[in-house]
Image (cartoon, rainbow, N blue to C red):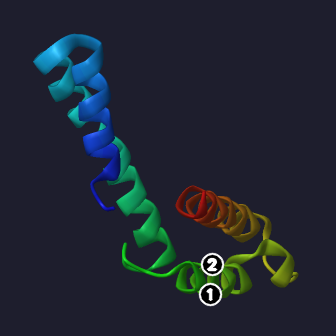
Amino acid sequence: MRYKKRYMGAVAGFFLSGIGGAVAGYLVGRIFDKNKERYYRILGIKPDSTPQMVKNAYRKLLKRYHPDLHPDADKHLKENLTDRTILIQKAYREIMH
């Protein structure tokens, strides 16, 4: 499962334009795999985590970083919390879908 996008890219590239396409597809798929690994790091979990573990990590981080839960924070801190929350939400969405 970990290398799924790499191999899917290679197969698609091969059917579209032979060996050169397969290599290009593999490399493009590898980029997508790297992004996915990044999302797991953002949530602080391993790539082999179960969906429930992903959900628990997501909820835990949102409770910690959501700007609405820090009403006393100054403007700069609120902006940082908002950016972090958006990043956490994106990571969760990419992993779960």
The answer to whether residue 81 is above or below residue 50 is above
Which type of secondary structure does the marked residue at label 2 adopt?
helix
What residue is disc 2 on? 58
Quarter where residue 49 is shown = bottom left
Whether tag 1 and tag 2 are in contact, CB under 8 A, the answer is: yes
The answer to whether residue 75 is above or below residue 10 is below
Disc number for residue 56: 1
Q: What's the residue type where badge 2 is placed?
A: Tyr
- Left or right: 87 as drawn, with respect to 78: left
Q: Residue at x 39, y 51 (%)?
A: 35
Which type of secondary structure does the marked residue at label 1 adopt?
helix
Q: Please say whether residue 28 is visible from this viewpoint.
A: no
For label 2, the crowd category at 10 Å Cα-Cα, with few meaning under 14, some 14 to 19 and many 20 or more, is: many
The answer to whether residue 10 is above or below residue 53 is above
- Disc 1 and disc 2: Cα gap in Å? 5 Å
- Left or right: 49 as drawn, with respect to 55: left
Q: Residue furthest front?
A: 15
Quarter where residue 71 is shown = bottom right
Q: Residue at x 79, y 65 (%)?
A: 75
Q: What's the residue type where badge 1 is placed?
A: Asn
State the residue in front, 34 or 68.
34
Disc number for residue 82: none
**Residue 34: image x %, image y %?**
32, 52
Q: Please say whether residue 65 is visible from this viewpoint.
A: yes
Q: Residue at x 70, y 79 (%)?
A: 62
**Residue 36: image x %, image y %?**
41, 56
